[in-house]
Image: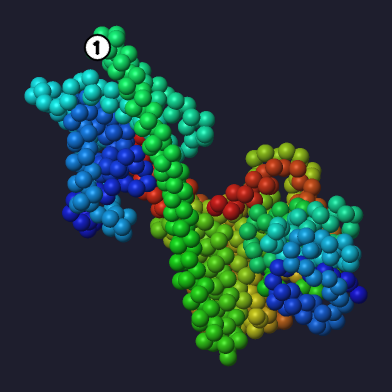
Amino acid sequence: MTTEVHRPRWQIPPLSRDERILGGACQALATELGVAPLAIRLSFVILVLAGGWGLVFYGLTWAFLAWAGPTGAEAAAYVPEPKAASLQHRYLAIALIVAGLILSLRTLGFGFVDQIVFPIGFVLTGVLIAWNRQQTEGGVGAAVRISAGVLVAAGGMIAVAALNVDSWEAVRLLSIMAVVLLGLSLIVGPSVARIGTELDKERQERVRADERARVAAHLHDSVLQTLTLIQKHSDDPKRMAQLARRQERELRTWLYEATPEQPGTMRLGPALDNVADAVEHDHEVRVEVVTVGDSLDLRPESIEDLVSATREAITNAAKHAEVDRIDVYAEHRTNAIEVFIRDAGVGFDPDAVAEDRHGIRQSIRARLERHGGRATIFSEPGQGTEVELYLPLNETTRRPATAGEPQPEPDEQEAEIDPENLLKAGGEHP
Amino acid sequence: MIRVALIDDHALVRAGVRGELEESENSDVDVVAEAGTVADAIDAIVRSKPDVVVCDVHLPDGTAADVIAGVVERGVTSRFLALSVSDAATDVIHVIRSGARGYVTKAIEGRDLVDAVRRVNDGDAVFSPRLAGFVLDAFSANLESPGNPELDELTAREQEVMRLLARGYAYKEIARRLSISIKTVESHASAVLRKLQLSSRNELAAWAANRKLV
């Protein structure tokens, strides 16, 4: 009953290269805990206020992750262990740990003095505000954010300086700090900016490379294989045409039907395409399928029987009609699905067919009658044949309405590329 | 002779189509120009003024719709038949709405292609089963908002004709089945084409866009 999912034991999370501000340690912890990275970053900043210990903790965490954490492919394959505690509880736990550490460290009293530690805390808070990037943000937003960060950092330092020391010393301290900051920004600023843009570029390139790899993988499995097969069969034009046609169908589906088939649902259009493909493979005939409308609310059994009946009809035409082309047209109407299988072949007189040869036609008929539908065959010698399948939409054929109707997920591909996006989306708004 | 321009970015495809057009039985088609890009196509068509342009939907620098727009702008009245491997409904509907009189897939046989060119040359519409399917889909998908009824809806007869086309019937088989003349079938098809091209409803475009996402 229970499905056993094998996952490795608890893993050390990898340092994040994509979303880091400093070394990527906060992002790594956040990913592992499934919380917003901002929460972890704030925690470290708050701990800086406790005698500067936040910096020490951060350094230790970073060093540990860099030393013991996975890298490369292993890091890419890393998936955080699902947590038993709810999101709220996890945030609460983080808050309690931070509070406990602050209280104990401040009580013990070692660490740097507040005059040094508080300005650093404010600067870091400013940095956090300035760098806490959201995925979708224009240039104006970024500018506002950075200015706000600088203001917080500066304002905080001024406030601390004013509160802790007398005014003369405050001015002196501030001017020293200003000079130091100015120097630092002159030295570090350009390279920080460069790192920022390079990170962005690198990320875009990675996304592009992933996409290219996905396309390449698909083309390799499909088109290249087929081309190889075609070369091997270059003395057999029919086989070549068959291979090319099958590949064409496959590639077209891949290109224009973005949503892959979801397990548990069966759509008529793709199912008929598969059937056509199979018949083309077994018989030397082209099968053109045209589907109008598509509904997901049919019982799988009903669709299955309809598809099987269609398959029988196409196979019959391929075997007996002596044509090189069969047309299949399926239409979803308001209260029924109709499928027409038509060939312009030799035809036959339906009345003249002996009773005992009704076997195949029975297998078509019976499949539809089971669901309250019907199959009608129109044919005349020399005038081709058309099989008409009719499946009513009613309580026996419709799937019972459920709330969780499968919806195509627009984000699916993005999630494949960067699972962190999902985590962030879930964690940013607890 | 019907003078035809052939627009496709693959020289091999052009050669193949050219062969099919010129060498089919009773062919009265003469290929007078070829081009592989939108810019070259417009030049070639303006220069040679063919009766019919057989044009690939996708070109390296644009689409068949761009070619049609460019040619119309220069006052040339050639008729267009779109030819493509692409079956994306969006592209097909777009090209038809830009003024092409028909759409066939490259899998079409030479005989049928010559037939389609002839039909377009006569000012008729050419519906492959797939195009007929797209049309039915487009006109049935949005019954909730009947904006401009007499222009937008297909008549029962037109629907019937489209359905038979989608089922793979040729015009003369449709005529026999509905007990009407081939001319009447043709005029129904042309009426549908006109509705498709003139239809003011945005839903048609929206439908085509959705279709790609389904």
Residue A7 placement, left or right of B133: left
Question: Residue lying farthest left?
Answer: A108
Q: Chain of mark 1?
A: A
Residue A228 placement, left or right of B97: left
**A35, above or below A397, in the image:** above
Residue B91 placement, left or right of A76: right
Residue B123 pos. (x, y %): 87, 62
Q: How is the image coloured?
A: rainbow
Residue B108 pos. (x, y %): 71, 73
Q: Residue at x 44, y 57 (%)?
A: A210
Q: Which residue is nearer to you in this view: A247 or A205?
A: A205
Q: Which residue is nearer to you in this view: A222 or B186?
A: A222
Q: Is residue A385 visible?
A: no
Residue A9 pos. (x, y %): 18, 54
Location of residue A100 (image quadrant)? top left
Q: Which residue is mark 1?
A: A165
